[in-house]
Image (cartoon, rainbow, N blue to C red):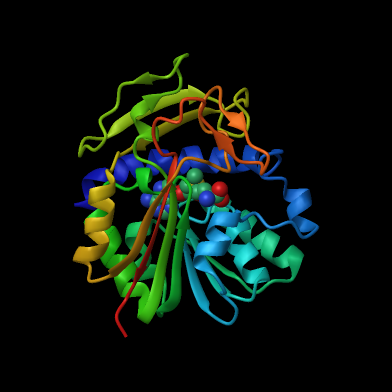
Amino acid sequence: MENKNQKYFEINKDTWNKKVSVHIKSDFYDVDGFKKGKTSLNAVELEELGNVKGKTLLHLQCHFGQDTLSWSRLGAKCTGIDISNEGIKNAKLLNDALGLDAIFIESNLYDVPKNVKGKFDIVFASYGVIGWLPNLQTWGEIIAEKLNNGGVFYLIEFHPIVWMFDYLQTPPKLIYPYQNSEVIYEEYKGTYTNKDADIISKEYGWNHGLGEVVSALAAAGLHIEFLREFEKSPYNILPEMEETADGMFVQKENLFPLLYSIKATKAL
Ligand SMILES: C[S@@+](CC[C@H](N)C(=O)[O-])C[C@H]1O[C@@H](n2cnc3c(N)ncnc32)[C@H](O)[C@@H]1O
């Protein structure tokens, strides 16, 4: 089923390769601060995933590796995968510059069974990953397959309601379905770290509702420990958000959640 999406994957890969060169120099990713020891992880995932010391961790869609390497600094034995060869190249450079021991592999999510050996104590993915995947059933099966017995899958992600808006219009307009099997195409100048960057982002994506995400994990045999929804986001993802004292962002009207997290386990 993934074959018919190959064209979309290629275009997304090209866009992400271009984004990496902008992101790596951005204030948003603050690579200098990161190199000096600042974690790129947020309080919510640090608290909810808990102690990773001595555990093997597979990071799906790791971008240029900062979160992967943040888990490495906390003592996890990490492997990061991403479709973007530029992302993986820079992740390896960052790993070497910091003298860490993470492994980075260029791979489409759907090719993980072919490209990544072994099983892991933890499979992790975060912020902006689900929407690049046409098929969640296979996604769930891959996660279950890559977990050791007793292993944990943890996801922290933007809420599907957030993806229903077109932010290229001001004010943002509710135009996309909550869930759909049809591909959504967007083309715009810049990227989320630098709206005026000299790149054109061409993106094919898929909206998946919470039911679909949870059901894909359950159908793959995982036990859902929790599904939580949050009104605060560490990222300023919508226009006109307000910053809170703890450095998070909220919407004035607070009408819908901005994030959700899922913890699921594989039986012993
Ligand atoms: C928004 S980023 C993840 C962000 C991450 N939390 C961070 O800030 O570092 C999404 C990532 O998914 C990757 N990606 C998109 N489609 C993919 C696919 N089919 N397989 C693997 N990675 C993919 C992109 O290259 C990108 O690095």
For residue 121, above or below residue 220: below
The quarter of the image holding the C terminus is bottom left
Q: Between residue 26 and residue 266, name the one nearer to us.
A: 266
Tell me which residue sits at (68%, 65%) in the image.
Answer: 95
From this viewpoint, which residue is outermost toward the top? 170
For residue 72, above or below residue 170: below
Residue 66 position by quadrant: bottom right
Tell me which residue sits at (39%, 42%) in the image.
Answer: 159
Q: Between residue 55 and residue 35, name the one nearer to us.
A: 55
Residue 166 screen position, x and y as percent? 39, 23
Q: Is residue 220 left or right of residue 151?
A: left
The answer to whether any part of residue 215 appears in the image is yes
Residue 261 screen position, x and y as percent? 42, 54
Residue 147 position by quadrant: bottom left
Q: Between residue 136 and residue 64, name the one nearer to us.
A: 136
Tell me which residue sits at (45%, 58%) in the image.
Answer: 125
From this viewpoint, which residue is outermost toward the right? 36
Residue 259 screen position, x and y as percent? 44, 44
Residue 26 screen position, x and y as percent? 69, 38
The answer to whether any part of residue 135 appears in the image is no
Q: Is residue 152 left or right of residue 218?
A: right
